[in-house]
Image (cartoon, helix red, strand yellow):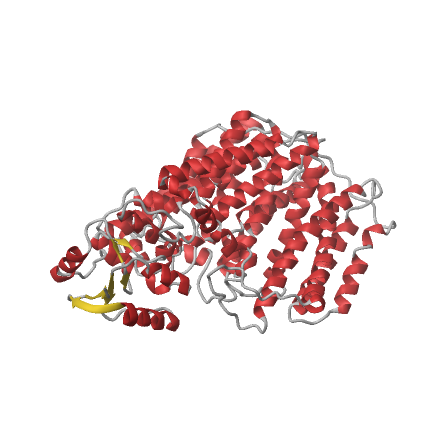
Amino acid sequence: MAFFPGACHLWRSAYGVGDFFVLAFRRISSRGGPLHFVKPITRSELELWRFQSLALWGACVGAVAAGLSAYLILNAAKPDLAVNLALDFPVVQSAVPNGEAVKRAEKIFYLLFYGFGAAAAFAALKLRKFFEGRSLVPFYLSSVIIITELHPFLRATFEPRFQALALTAMVAAGFIPFVKRFPTRIHINGDAEARPIGLFEFGWVDAVLIAALLALILPMDVQGMATRAAGGNHPVSYLTGPALYHFAKGLVPGRDFLAFYGYGPPYLLSRFLTADANALYCLYIRLIAGSLVIFHVSAYWVLRDFFQNRAMPFVLAFVFLALCQYADGDAFGGPSALAIRYMFVFIAVGILARLMVKPSGWLLVALSAVCGVSIFWNTETGIYTWAVACAALCVRLLERRRFWEVAAFTGMSIVFLLGLFVAAFGPAVLSKDFLYVFLTPLGLHSFSNWVSVTLIWQPGFGTVYQIVMPAIAIGTAVSVAGAWTGSRTVERAYLLVLSLVALVFMTKWVNRSLDAVWQQNAFAYLAVGAWWGRSAFRAAVGRTKSQLVPAMSLGAVAVVSVAVLLSAQDRRQHVTIGLRSYLQYPSIASFRWKPSAGPIKVALDASDVELVNRVLPPGGRMLLLSDQDWLVLPALGRAPKSDFMPFRDMFSRDQVIRSFAGADYFFLERGATNQYDWLKEMVDQILQEQFEHSEESTRFILYRRKS
């Protein structure tokens, strides 16, 4: 080994690691008998499998009804589906003919899928006595045929064409479970349910895994990431732009400026606002990193309580991290793709699941507080979290509980939310105008036609996440709710809540229809799917005496999973996503610790600073058109006067009018460009009619309002 000086040291290290695992294996074996890679399935899981089989079949039948209804709405009723519900945000046109109407029909399909699917799943559970003693094979066979034929039927529906053959096959498949002569079901014995890991239990394994998560999440190259993030406009509209308005006192979102996504992150960043643009964007990177730590650590902790082991939650927490990455490891440049949007969701899931099983006034107050903070943090996903909590609490009405619990939860959530808004922005937020703007992100990202990008109805992974996963989530939620009064366990409560989260959080994907958006919101789908996959695995190999088959099976699953994560690709956007992108992310674990870029510099000379100081006092608002107003304004210590940041990316004429209203000065950066032709024409017209050229500096041209 002389040709490799470090080989001996590496060999000794590997030998030491091997000794560690051998000793750990012996220690575990001596404590609990033979070590099993896969535990046997429990009786509770077996019981839920039968409910789930019927509910899944019912959800698939409901999907057929939803698909046929969508076809009739789009091609028979022909309502005005192209109307834009995005308020003053224009529709982003697609290349598909009549794309706006098709996009609306797709949303109607999913709305009906959820409704008809849930109703049909409940109806299927009502027939369980009729199907008592029969094999589950016909239900799965029927579901597979329906899903296989539904995808081409929907693809034809939205072209639009009519697939009579596919519809006939689906209708015929729906009656397969009624055929009595099928092979008898396989008998599997289940073990008693055990919960060896307590919610607040913390051991050295947890410490190691959480430390590993921190190493995978936290970036080392903060400066390089900050410099690259400062070159884009997405961080501006999401976070840094709304924070800059706090350079002036007394400004209220909705009245004085538009917060495009939510209020929490910009407000938190504004508490550390600085006139150093480089320091500001380094703070931005650290804020996002801290948010990711809260999300992924809470995901590990809550999923540990759900799965009652530590390996699966750790793997899922890492998968969540990898799926949100895109581009060359620079996802911090697109914060709306990251878990900062729904940072508190797993905390809410954990509290809600415990509340479902063991009602407590303190847990209800805690859930209300978390939902209020979630809505303050991000309007869209916060309201989703609140809606999931309301739906889950309504299941408790099956226990003949009174409606007061849902009412009390809603009332306390509103109180907490209003308290946060008043504390942050003052009593001026208690107005109809603020409420109108406050709800804008929900409509914009959920049901509007702001982005009329249609779904790609092609078989493959599209079939899995467009039809299979929603059907599984609907079937899971209905099967747990249907059996709730007879079996209230923490595990089932988690299944119910996570299934509801999966369905509700996919609203943005239905609106945007990008594969990357599905991945970024798929965390609950993956958790529910992992639970069912583990149950199937336990039923198949949980009682085998040899551990070779389970070990090889787990290895094969791991290899396939890594291959899927590496092959993830958005079919519309030519950008790297998933694990391939994460492998370029400069985390602590990557050992890429050297700064990849220098500090952010803003080119302002004495004449620029003197001109601004002479015209605008400190704490004033500056109306500036610049290609990087998000860097120039903090360097000058001035709040934006524009209604939206960046100014050059204004969405509508109303926003431009609100920006110029009350402005006595307009600063134009030399060489500044506009994102849209209409914006340039409108600004030029306003300057010609209402302003006059005043003076200049090295970087700016100043226009003064005509007297």
Q: Quadrant of residue 509?
A: bottom right
The total of numbered circles placed on residues is: 0
Q: Is residue 367 left or right of residue 653?
A: right
Residue in front for this viewpoint, 597 or 77: 77
Q: Residue at x 40, y 61 (%)?
A: 327
Q: Residue at x 56, y 31 (%)?
A: 408
Q: Quadrant of residue 615?
A: bottom left
Q: Is residue 434 left or right of residue 83?
A: left
Q: Is residue 573 left or right of residue 544?
A: left
Residue lying furthest right in this view?
181
- Residue 478 point in image, percent of width and height: 69, 43
Asked if residue 551 is positioned above or below residue 101 in the image, the reply reads above
Residue 22 at least partly seen:
no
Asked if residue 542 is positioned above or below residue 638 in the image, the reply reads above
- Residue 707 point in image, percent of width and height: 23, 64
Residue lying furthest front in this view?
707
- Residue 636 point in image, percent of width and height: 20, 54
Residue in front for this viewpoint, 237 or 581: 237
Q: Is residue 562 left or right of residue 463?
A: left
- Residue 475 point in image, percent of width and height: 68, 46
Q: Quadrant of residue 108?
A: bottom right
Residue 440 at least partly seen:
yes
Asked if residue 526 is positioned above or below residue 415 in the image, the reply reads below
